[in-house]
Image (cartoon, rainbow, N blue to C red):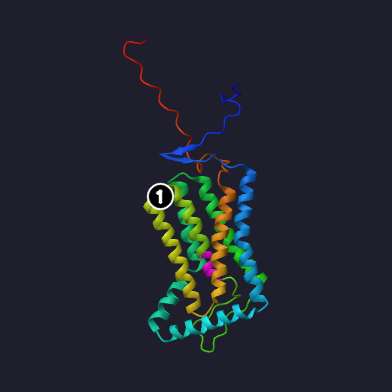
Amino acid sequence: MPDGKGAHAGTPPPTRRRGSAAYAPVPSRARRLLRAVGYGLAFSVPIALLAFLVREKFLPVIDLDEGAIRAATDITRAHDGLRTALVVWQEAFQPRWVYIVGSLVCLWVWRRAGLTTRAAWAFVTMMVAWNLQLVLKAVVQRARPVVSDPVSHAPGYSFPSGHVANVAAATTILVILLWPLLPTGGRRLAVAAAVVLTALTCLDRVFLGVHFPSDTVAGVLFGVGLGLASYAGYVGWNPVGPDDAPPPEEAPAPPPRPRGTP
């Protein structure tokens, strides 16, 4: 029989639609938490394993890292134009510039698109990523590559690559942030741009000789994993208003009545 809200007992919660696309019901808090933990473990376990291997100087990984650094810096040293482009990319994708751009996108989504809590989620997650990768560097304390004729220099520890971790986190978060506002073609373009920017940043760090390849792999896992785990815990949580959830399915229009009926 109907309850106080007019729903029939035992009736499953309705799905919600945006246009013609159906959405599942908002997940419960426990389910969101489990999903977030699952994403976190899926990415943090490989990072922890890689950190252990580099800390213990596992020879296959160390040999691969050092061989790649020697080969990459030899190529950079032989091409002045490539070196200039790499240095420009390094400066353009400093975390402060990445997050300034990301913050402006969050501001636009908040003010112009009205997705208040979604924009707040994206901004807070980016700030957490920025600081958390610094904590991870301090925990692992891996030294930077040592090159006989260095192409470039960078301060601090090496694992994970801060540039890569922050670019991967920011692009993942911004793609998720903008997803409901983009058409299908725009979504594909956004994902492709995120992949290309992250991959080029990985190459930049290795070809400048300031990070080992394993540092960049850890940076990708960190950034993408944090973004996905954070969103899995956030989605459906709307204390201010239903700005992240799709609008409820509209009730079907009543059938037209025959002419002459009152």
Write the residue at 61% across / 59% down.
Answer: 42
Location of residue 134 by image quarter: bottom right
Q: Main secondary structure of the magenta part?
A: helix
Magenta highlight on residue 5: no
Check disc 1 and report the residue beneath it.
182
- Is residue 126 left or right of 20 when viewed as pictured? right
Q: Where is residue 16 in the image (x, y as percent from the top left)?
A: 49, 37
User: Where 18 sits versus 208, above or below?
Assistant: above
| Category of crowding for the residue at label 1, using alpha-carbon neighbours closer than 10 angstroms: few (below 14), some (14–19), many (at least 20) | some
Write the residue at 40% across / 25% down.
Answer: 253
Q: Nearer the viewer, residue 123 or 180?
A: 180
User: Where 31 sits versus 41, above or below?
Assistant: above
Write the residue at 43% across / 66% down.
Answer: 196
Location of residue 222 by image quarter: bottom right
Q: Quadrant of the N terminus?
A: top right
Q: Position of residue 171 (x, y in %)?
A: 48, 60
Q: Nearer the viewer, residue 155 or 198?
A: 198
Q: Position of residue 200 (x, y in %)?
A: 45, 70
Q: Which residue lies furthest to the bottom in this view?
A: 148
User: Where 194 sits versus 155, above or below?
Assistant: above
What amino acid type is highlighted by mark number 1?
Leu
Is residue 136 at least partly visible in the picture?
A: yes
User: Where 139 sits versus 172, above or below?
Assistant: below
Q: Where is residue 197 in the image (x, y as percent from the top left)?
A: 44, 66
Q: Nearer the viewer, residue 10 or 129?
A: 10
Q: What element carries label 1?
A: loop
- Is residue 253 left or right of 49 when viewed as pictured? left
Q: Quadrant of the C terminus?
A: top left
The magenta span reads 161-166
